[in-house]
Amino acid sequence: MNKKDAYAAIKILDYRRFILARFLLTFAIHMQSVIVGWQIYELTHDALSLGMIGLAEAIPFLSVALFAGHVADTVNRKKIILVTNIIYVVCAIALLLISTQFHFALAKFGVFPIYIIIFITGLARGFMSPATSAFAAQLIPKELFGNASTWNSVAWQTAEISSPAIGGLVYGFWGVGAAYSLVIIFSLVGWFFFSSVKNKPMPEKTKEEPISKSLTAGLKFVFSNQIILGSISLDMFAVFFGGAVAVLPIFADQILHVGAQGLGFLRAAPAVGAVLMSFIQAHNPPFKNAGRNLIISVFLFGLCIIAFAIARNFYLVLFVLFLSGAVDNISVIIRHTIIQTYTPDEMRGRVSAVNGIFIGSSNELGSFESGVAAKLLGLIPSVIFGGCMTLIVATVTSFIAPKLRKLKM
């Protein structure tokens, strides 16, 4: 990796366009997420209903993940990205219409129509995720994978900072229609920049294999590599147990009393920490003791989640969430670089799909777990439980994955 030039990856025109496109689409997706969360909470005032949002997206994502990975390694990746981006736009339009023009659907069926639309976005994300990851690796030389992962994180987390805050503010001051309209605009502009990236040929396959073997090849590769499997598993369980995003609307309303506007800032706080940490890591890459740093960062994330559950002051909560985003970003960049570095070109789609099963779905399933735990244990105990489980996961991983713990890159 080029350690001398912290901006090496974004000096490549196509990668710069790709990062901008991903920022815009991520902005739209996360803005939509906070809008849907607050809308469903206003309609139901129920923690389990908030958790069901994650389940509605995770089920289709998991259902198509392996096949989507196979498709990303056999079909033009840029075309997959453009088609799935358009599906996001259509779903945002559907949410706008059902929220502003067809109120009778919500009156008759409750929040079920919203879950259906989220289900469709889950299908689109299932195909977009491996294609996007595999296509990104084709835009840069291998020695810049770590640097590119850092700037990809900057784009992703910057979108997470701005989109929830803007989504909450627009929803709070101008209503749900204006909020969903902004989602549509950002999704369309993102599609435009994706389309401006030059097409890349598919990597040559080292061997021909039937689709049945192709579908499971990514799983076999990941499970045969302790370093990749350990890094993915560590993040998966940390996100599954430690994610408190699903219950943030309840914290904003019942604990902190800050409303939709405050919810936007709560959602943005972890991303602020992540962006600042990304800039630090761009100039000081964390790869010298990558495995050790990965495990420590997940352990610190668990401590932040426990502190979040205990804190009662709004500004203290913002600070704790800020720290959680900073330490989580370390693990994200290390894990992503590990996967990109150790995966053959012709398998990137399938391995990315497996990573998506472990990590991507854990966000949604973690949201569901948070909603169920809050329902069964109570809001505060459920978040403390999740933080403690994250500490246990980090500790256990350090013992059962020695190759990961000792990894230096």
Image (cartoon, rainbow, N blue to C red):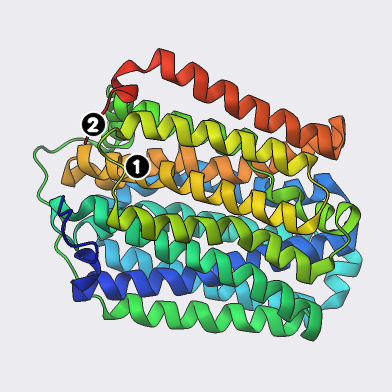
Residue 330's quadrant in the figure?
top left
Is disc 1 in contact with disc 2, using a CB cutoff of under 8 Å? no
**Left or right: 239, with 154 as reference point:** right
In percent of width and height, residue 390 lies at 59, 29
In percent of width and height, residue 86 lies at 47, 74
Residue at 75% across, 63% down:
263
Q: Residues within 10 Å of mark 2 (few under 14, many from 20)?
A: some
Q: Residues within 10 Å of mark 1 (few under 14, many from 20)?
A: many
Residue nearer the viewer, 265 or 98? 265
Q: In which quadrant of the rendered image does the C terminus lie?
A: top left
Circle 1 SS class:
helix
Indicate which disc, 1 or 2, sits on the residue closer to the N terminus: 1
Q: Height in image: 232 above or below 345?
A: above
What residue does disc 2 label? 408
Residue 82's quadrant in the figure?
bottom left
**Left or right: 313, with 200 as reference point:** right
Q: Is residue 198 visible?
A: no
**Left or right: 382, with 74 as reference point:** right
Frontmost of labels 1 and 2 is 2
Q: What number is the disc on residue 234?
A: none
Q: Amino acid at mark 2?
A: Lys
Circle 2 SS class:
loop
Q: Height in image: 73 above or below 104?
A: above
Residue nearer the viewer, 126 or 322? 322
Residue at 63% across, 40% down:
304
Residue at 74% across, 59% down:
315
What residue does disc 1 label? 334
